[in-house]
Amino acid sequence: MAREIINYAQSVFSVTTTNQIMVKEKKAGQDIRIYNNHASAVTYLNTSGKAGHALDFTSGGTTEIAVDDEVEGESGGATGNVVKVDLDSGTWAGADAAGTIWIDTLTGTFQSETLKVGASLNLATIAAVQDVTRSVRISAGGSLELLNAVNEIYVIGSAAHKLVVFTGIKSGGHS
């Protein structure tokens, strides 16, 4: 597999199944947002450090959990800021949503419990939190934020001619 090395400043590039891209961040602690601009293909990232935390959920309630929500464990009180929600099955409106909630900050320890956002209770049921240190999937049209990003991020796609965009975001916030 060929590997091309680019600098973070080169913000738009193609990712294919045979050409792996390595993005080198020269500034330690840079916050970035990664977009998958393809209509149907998936992008995979492999990071050299912790990429965030994942909460696999079932029994998603009728209120949708969204990017920038702060989720809280109803039993343990752990909190995390939502940067992405992948819906694998069901719907929020049908109260049977299931998938993964990605968080970039974590305070406390999530346990097997239900999640709330503000005063909205029992929005989803989780088993526990998982640290994400390897492959991260970005669905077609989706994005992922990495705060205090690692120095090397490896990107590969599931189809040719897919564009991936890296953009800087303000530290500690979302734009």
Image (cartoon, helix red, strand yellow):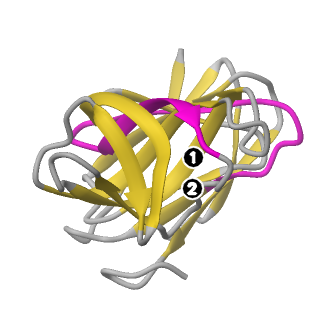
In the displayed structure, does residue 162 sit left or right of residue 115? right
Q: Measuring 36% from the left and 70% from the top, which residue is drawn there?
A: 31
Residue 162 percent coordinates (x, y): 79, 39
Local crowd size for mark 1, using a 10 Å CA cut-off: few (<14), some (14–19), many (≥20): many
Question: Dividing the picture into quarters, in which one does residue 40 lie?
Answer: top right
Split into 4 quadrants, where in the image is the C terminus?
Answer: bottom right
Which of the pair 53/25 is nearer the observer? 53
Local crowd size for mark 2, using a 10 Å CA cut-off: few (<14), some (14–19), many (≥20): many
Q: Measuring 15% from the left and 47% from the top, which residue is drawn there?
A: 76
In the displayed structure, does residue 69 sit left or right of residue 129? right
Residue 78 percent coordinates (x, y): 19, 54
Q: Measuring 47% from the left and 67% from the top, which residue is drawn there?
A: 69
In the displayed structure, does residue 173 sit left or right of residue 89? left
Tell me, yes or no, if residue 23 can be seen here: no
Q: Is residue 159 above or below residue 83?
A: above
Which residues fall within the magenta stretch?
Answer: 35-61
Residue 38 percent coordinates (x, y): 83, 43
Q: Which residue is mark 1?
A: 85
Give the number of the mark in front: 1 or 2.
2
Which of the pair 116/102 is nearer the observer? 116
Q: Amino acid at mark 2?
A: Ile
As drawn, the residue found furthest toward the right would be: 39
Q: Is residue 163 above or below residue 172?
A: above
The numbered disc on residue 134 is: none
Question: Dividing the picture into quarters, in which one does residue 77 lie?
Answer: bottom left
Q: Are marks 1 and 2 in contact (CB under 8 Å)?
A: yes
Secondary structure under tag 1 reads strand
Residue 95 percent coordinates (x, y): 69, 37
Secondary structure under tag 2 reads loop
Q: Amino acid at mark 1?
A: Val
